[in-house]
Image (cartoon, rainbow, N blue to C red):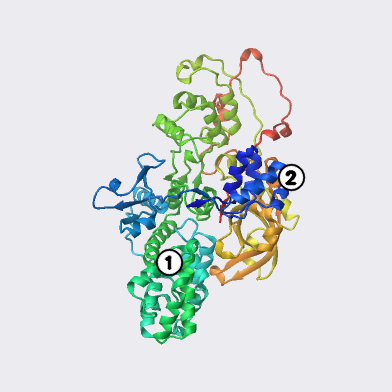
Amino acid sequence: MISFRSRSAIREVGKVLGLSPDTVGVMADTVWGMGSSGVKIEHVREVGLDPADPRIMLALELSSDLCGFPRHLSQHVGGFVLTQDRLDELVPIQNAAMEERTVVEWDKDDLDVLGIYKVDVLALGMLTALRKSFALVEKHYGEKLTLAMRPDDKNVYEMLCRADSVGVFQVESRAQMSMLPRLKPREYYDLVVEVAIVRPGPIQGGMVHPYLKNRANRDAVVYPKPEMKAVLERTLGVPLFQEQAMQIAIVGAGFSPEEADRLRRAMATFRHNGTIYRFKQPFIRGMEENGYEKDFAERCFKQIEGFGEYGFPESHAASFAILVYASSYVKHYYPEVFAAALLNSQPMGFYAPAQLVRDAREHDVDVRPPDINASDRDCTLEPGKNNRCALRLGLCQVTGLSREAANQLVARRGAMPYRDPADLWRRSGLTKRQIVALARADAFASMGLTRRDVLWAVRGFPEGQLPLLDTQPEARDLEPPVTLPRLTLGEQVVDDYSSFSLSLRSHPMELLRATFAQHGVSSTEALKTAKNGALLTLAGLVLVRQRPGTASGVVFVTLEDEFGVANLVVWPKVFEAYRRIVMGARLMGVRGRVQCEGEKEYKVIHLVADEVWDLSADLDSISELDLFHLTHGRGDAVRTDSDDRRVKTPEANATRHRSSRGVTAKPGYDRSRIALDRPKIRIASRDFH
């Protein structure tokens, strides 16, 4: 049963009361995560709305009352039910929203009580990404990989010990990346533990620090009895898995297998039903009767109780660890393949495509921009340097171009590249709007055309005439050469981010670095050499905001500049003081204390925030900035010397003008005239609650 929470409640009530979508959206955005305490008046006032307004006041009151009321029945995303006879003669079945899908209307617990066999199916995007990775590796490098590979490559484990795990299955989150240098996995079972230990259950049960302590000094681990050693030895005396909790109950507390299974079910109910407390007294009493100290029994139950907040079965963690190793292997030895497969499997994972591309480039992958004559719909690999492939971004990365349109463009291109924008318009069947989207993505660079060349050419396409019927384009008068103002580097970066949420030319912070340096803002490079406790001021694009339920209100923020990323820790008091900035800033400045743990390449570094600023306005000003002249994306073979096609053959600009009008002098280019037309730079940040 899914109930109304603060965000869904204010949206539904706002519609009923006739509030504008913008107003409702602003109020909903003041709520962090899935809380059910309603929208607070002070937060509404912070965003510029008047909580004394009668309709807003009523919306706040009604939405608060609505929180907790049933909204709809939840559905498991996949699974099946097995019966001896026809299923529809036993249980009611309804059609699902998806075509050829049905839903069993009974609750899973009802099926269990009746003894009907149910199997849940878990769908993982990483399985798709690995399948695509293996196919690309075999096609381009001739190595045949499978999930059955031996998990014993030391280089792969060394990469994980450095927390170089962006994109890797299950170990790419902030918490996992902080744990990797501390746990230092060196073999397969270490990955099993890594997957299981960074979970609400072990964290709430106080298992993390005892395990790390025992791992650092294995000889100091003490087991009260030999039978308990048989249960806990593989996890160094600390129960990390549900199976171990059941074994402790049977071996230590004398539970029958049926009672232990009921304990497992109580652990599996999470915090929604809270039935695990019923087993506390029988568990402690049973362990005391079997000769265990009461203090040890209580500690064991407290750890088991943590599984009520979500703990992993060992079999589940072991299966996931196979995918951790396989994805790590591909990332280490074939980073271009790994990046292509992840991009082609979106949406999935912890990071947006922009961060996956940045990480690939940090691993020396040659990333090339989308191009109408070089790109397919999906990201592909093409010949690069030093016997390595380069990564060509696919047309599906371009905002405003559907997958169907990308498929159509590629299919009609065939073996004959498009000659110019007009040829693309005639042959591909794309609309002018779709060609404009490609132009803004700078997808014509291999023709020697800039964004403005193509946008100018598109304006010359006739209205109301089908391009396929334009059989005599050569009969038209061609325009004389037109010199268009060149784009600043800042304008190109803004267009890049607006078109596919990243730029291969420059990072926005690189353009702002000179200005920020004058105000004492350091780069993330300074974190690597900063001493523990040092005061530091940073700024960067907001990539990820995370507020785990196990973190007692602490918010974790990841910032990115041109040198790398910085991991921020925002304590609850600081978050409440700067709530609106932390939740909404695209470019954030922060001053705080450096927190270091570990040594050398295994060091874990955080910046504990004392003060933050919203610098998004500076981000919107970078279109006026320029560092150097760059007219094409990196990785394209575009000539800009005297043999440039734009110079040698002016008609390549595809600019048309009636000769009878003559050529008139134009006034100088005034950037302020188009400031309102320049899109805002778009940052693909992700929030996790």
Q: Give 325 or 2, whichever is nearer the viewer.
A: 2
Q: Is residue 213 above or below residue 49?
A: below
Q: Residues within 10 Å of mark 1 (few under 14, many from 20)?
A: many
Tell me the quarter of the picture where residue 16 sits: top right
Instruction: Look at mark 2 in the image and give the residue it sits on.
Output: 50
Horizontal relation, residue 94 to residue 177: left or right = left
Q: Give the answer, above or below, for where 405 lies relative to 217.
A: above
Examine the rendering and report whether any part of residue 236 can be seen: no
Image quadrant in which you'd find residue 109: bottom left
Kind of residue sitting beneath label 1: Ala
Position of 13 with respect to 95 (left or right) is: right
Q: Secondary structure at mark 1?
A: helix
In the displayed structure, 590 sits above or below 180; it is above
Residue type at mark 2? Asp
Quadrant containing the C terminus in the rendered view: bottom right
Query: Residue at horizontal 54%, vertical 29%?
Result: 433
Residue 232 place in picture, x, y as percent: 40, 77
Residue 256 percent coordinates (x, y):
34, 75
Looking at the image, tell me whether mark 2 or mark 1 is earlier in sequence order.
Answer: 2
What residue appears at the point 45 percent right and 34 percent down from the top-left corner?
Answer: 406
Frontmost residue, 221 versus 554: 554
Please name the residue that numbered disc 1 is placed on: 266
Q: Residue furthest left?
A: 84
For marks 2 and 1, give the CA distance: 46 Å
